[in-house]
Image (cartoon, rainbow, N blue to C red):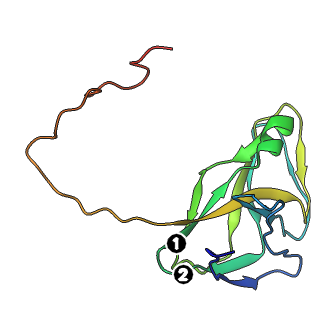
Amino acid sequence: MDNEIRIEIVRTRAAARLPRYMTEQAAGMDLYAAGDEAVVLAPGERALVPTGISIALPPGFEAQIRPRSGLALKHGVTLLNSPGTIDADYRGEIAVIVINHGRESFTVKPGDRIAQMVVAPVSRAAWQPVAELPGSGRGAGGFGHTGK
């Protein structure tokens, strides 16, 4: 892999599993629940689920924490604050805010795949205050202005 990025990782809990790409072309690595016990989420309930890992990204990168599509489709379970951002200077344990939008209770067990993590380069903006913005074909149109 010619664009490999080295990321330091520490297991902060005994049950922690390292993030893992599940296929050769996967963009995201699966993250695993690493709590001490199962968490039961009633419909509409949310919980902070630990992954048991801390990482040190190289400068100029972030890790985006995203939902798993299968959990969303099959169970109505997704992540709040999505995508979450892990900054290159954050050293705490990664945890995800899981919410159950489904109709039935959902149990998150230690070792379950609960999210995915995508490592991406970061661009930083430099603001340039001006008196007026340049025109565009779209202008200020938004919120469905182009129709269905």
**CA neighbours of label 2 inside 10 A, class few (<14), some (14 to 19), many (20+):** some
Residue situated in front as seen by the camera: 107 or 28: 28
The CA span between labels 2 and 1 is: 6 Å
- Location of residue 50 with respect to 54 vertically, above or below: above
Viewport quadrant of the N terminus:
bottom right
Q: Position of residue 68 (x, y in %)?
A: 76, 49
Q: Position of residue 63 (x, y in %)?
A: 60, 66
Could you tell whether 63 is left or right of 100 in the image? left
The residue under the point 75% across, 58% down is 25
* Disc 2 secondary structure class: loop
Could you tell whether 132 is left or right of 65 in the image? left
* Disc 1 secondary structure class: strand
Q: Position of residue 96 (x, y in %)?
A: 70, 60
Q: Position of residue 80 (x, y in %)?
A: 64, 48
Could you tell whether 54 is left or right of 15 in the image? left
| Circle 1: residue type | Phe
List the single residue furthest toward the left: 131
The residue under the point 14% across, 54% down is 129
Label 1 sits on residue: 61
- Location of residue 143 with respect to 54 vertically, above or below: above
Where is residue 13, by image quadrant?
bottom right
Residue situated in front as seen by the camera: 133 or 86: 133
| Circle 2: residue type | Pro
Q: Are marks 2 and 1 in contact (CB under 8 Å)?
A: yes
Label 2 sits on residue: 58
- Location of residue 95 with respect to 100 vertically, above or below: below
Where is residue 56, by image quadrant?
bottom right
**CA neighbours of label 1 inside 10 A, class few (<14), some (14 to 19), many (20+):** some
The residue under the point 65% across, 59% down is 65
List the single residue furthest toward the top: 147
Could you tell whether 36 is left or right of 98 in the image? right
